[in-house]
Amino acid sequence: MLTQEYDVIVVGAGHAGCEAAAAAANLGSSVLLVTMNMNTIAQMSCNPAMGGVAKGQIVREVDALGGQSGIITDKTMIQFRMLNRSKGPAMWSPRAQSDRMRFAEEWRLTLEGIRNVDFWQEAVTGLLVEDGTCVGVRTQLGIEFRSKTVVLTNGTFLNGLIHIGEKNFGGGRAAERKSTGITEQLRELGFETGRMKTGTPPRVDGRTLDYSKMEEQAGDENPSKFSYLDTPTLSKQRPCYITYTNEKVHDILRTGFEKSPMFQGRIKGLGPRYCPSVEDKINRFADKDRHQIFVEPEGWSTVEVYVNGFSSSLPEDVQYEALRQIAGFENAKMFRPGYAIEYDFFPPTQLHLTLETKPVRNLYFAGQINGTTGYEEAACQGLMAGINAHQRVRELEPFILRRSEAYIGVLIDDLVNKGTDEPYRMFTSRAEHRILLRQDNADLRLTPLAHKLGLASDERMARVEQKRQQTADVLDYLSKKPVEPGEINGLLEELGSAPIHEKTRVVNLLRRPQLDLPDLQRALPELHEHLGQYGAEVLEQASIHVKYETYIEKEHQQAERMGQLEDLRIVGRLDYKAMPALSHEAREKLLKVQPETIGQASRISGISPADISVLMVYLGK
């Protein structure tokens, strides 16, 4: 293996690296996965959970495309909840607590089960670049591994610096060393770099907590899952708990502010806006007398507990003293304190939509190196980078998802066209077509694309076709099934809906906001009997289609209009400086990003509709 030329080398074995290696290898590429520590493959560095608002949609999309994160989460989760059920289906977001140790173990076993994946444990200190093309990597031992493509997924390890109070030391994660050399080389190759910051809370001994003083947060009564395949469904679950900080906690934390690396300016990188440290929360929201704390078990058997909401880089003694003032934590013992970590990232406007870098050919970036935060955001980037590295090796068409096709498409499009100066996190509000991009239909949207690539199996495709056909059958039945007033008016009165005075179709009743399909099945035995042959997933799909048909159709029409701009390609590297009718900002941004389509150009920050009109006239000439 020391002399073999690989198709793809993946550097880093976090969530991005694992998905990249699995995708490229399952497509048929020879892959070398290089990691500093084989024992921390797919480590959940922060909270032991997958999914959440918008993030759950991403995990389902990764699964629909033939990725592994959803399958592994299903095999190792200890609790499942569907968030936002009180809102519309575009907002429903699956989230699972995972067994941290089992999650990492399952990922490693999955990768070891893929014949095309080789492993090497060592730090990568540099890239092999010839004539502007990446052709391999160099390790700390001076070994050179050659390849046709390289995917960098270095996470928080590039020149990582850990802060706890006034102490700081190099590291990419607790008890793991940082990675050096790559940033410096990439700067020399013309890359722009920046610094970002993230943090993690203390871990405590669950045996020392008094859960009777906390609110129990149980999983769903009928838990679902992430994967569309036959993965196990939870038969038992572990509860999480909710407690709160108080004024005493806040006062103790304030005593450490003079030693805070964040407040004293020792941390230069920007942290995640939507996941602030506890000291940042009490500083920014001084009017709040308490903040919510989620107490999350780290697995089925371990006593280790994750204190979600108490991320901190204050001195360890201040953290410990403040922690013990929280209800239920009076006798808590700490396993390790929270800390902040600064690391290098590369502004993602330096990438193509394939995640290949613009300055160096055949080099791909995925995960936190691109300025994102979160396992899910990293996993989907790794999947897309792995697919596109394989496509490049085989001289096949690049695989790019549009904003109307997937949250993954939204994420990558945002990164490449808008960039980010703070850790990027996905939200449903970022997706203008979110009613199309629901968690329940990711397989219908994406599995056909993945099957065409060769990444989604025939089994997956058969399931999608069956779901599509069965949904159509249910919709057809609902549109034809008549209902007499005497059969349904009792239910309508019970639910506060207007009675009917003549025979109507079931589909007309289902469009009413007060009625759901289970209500109608309860009132109409014949309907219940007929629909009993279909699974819950199909019935949910049909019900959503009926209730939101008008909105879905409008979204499709809007997506088609935007798609016309995506089909207008910009061929070659244009000299935007020679287009005086463009605004100065437009010329500057277009030169930097070099968009590949008119649609992409229209989404660059600072590009106006007038600039797009000028550009289209120019291209028309």
Image (cartoon, rainbow, N blue to C red):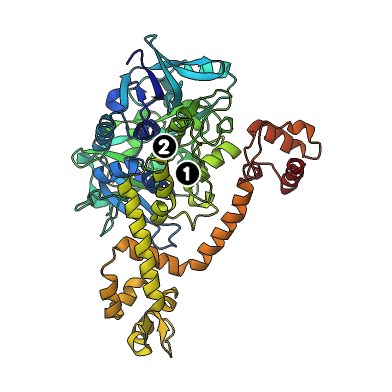
* Label 2 environment density (alpha carbons within 10 Å; few <14, some 14–19, many ≥20): many
Q: Quadrant of residue 616?
A: top right
Count of picture labels: 2
Relative side of 13 to 102, left or right: right
Report the residue at 55% width, 22% height from top. 360
Relative side of 380 to 69, left or right: right
Q: Position of residue 266 (x, y in %)?
A: 51, 24
* Label 1 environment density (alpha carbons within 10 Å; few <14, some 14–19, many ≥20): many
Report the residue at 34% width, 39% height from top. 47
Q: Amino acid at mark 1?
A: Ile
Disc number at residue 482? none
Q: Is residue 291 visible?
A: no
- Label 2: state its secondary structure: helix
Q: Amino acid at mark 2?
A: Leu
Residue at numbered disc 1: 408
Q: Position of residue 378 (x, y in %)?
A: 42, 36
Measure the alpha-carbon separation of dots 2 and 1.
10 Å
Q: Are marks 2 and 1 in contact (CB under 8 Å)?
A: yes
Q: Nearer the viewer, residue 286 or 145?
A: 145
Query: Would you place residue 545 above or below residue 434 in this image?
Result: below
Q: Position of residue 224 (x, y in %)?
A: 29, 55
Q: Is residue 392 visible?
A: yes
- Label 1: state its secondary structure: helix
Report the residue at 49% width, 58% height from top. 435
For the C terminus, which image quadrant?
top right
Q: Residue furthest top?
A: 142
For the N terminus, which image quadrant?
top left
> Which comes sooner in the sequence, label 2 or label 1?
2
Relative side of 276 to 587, left or right: left
Residue at numbered disc 2: 383
Q: Quadrant of residue 179?
A: top left
Q: Position of residue 129 (x, y in %)?
A: 51, 16
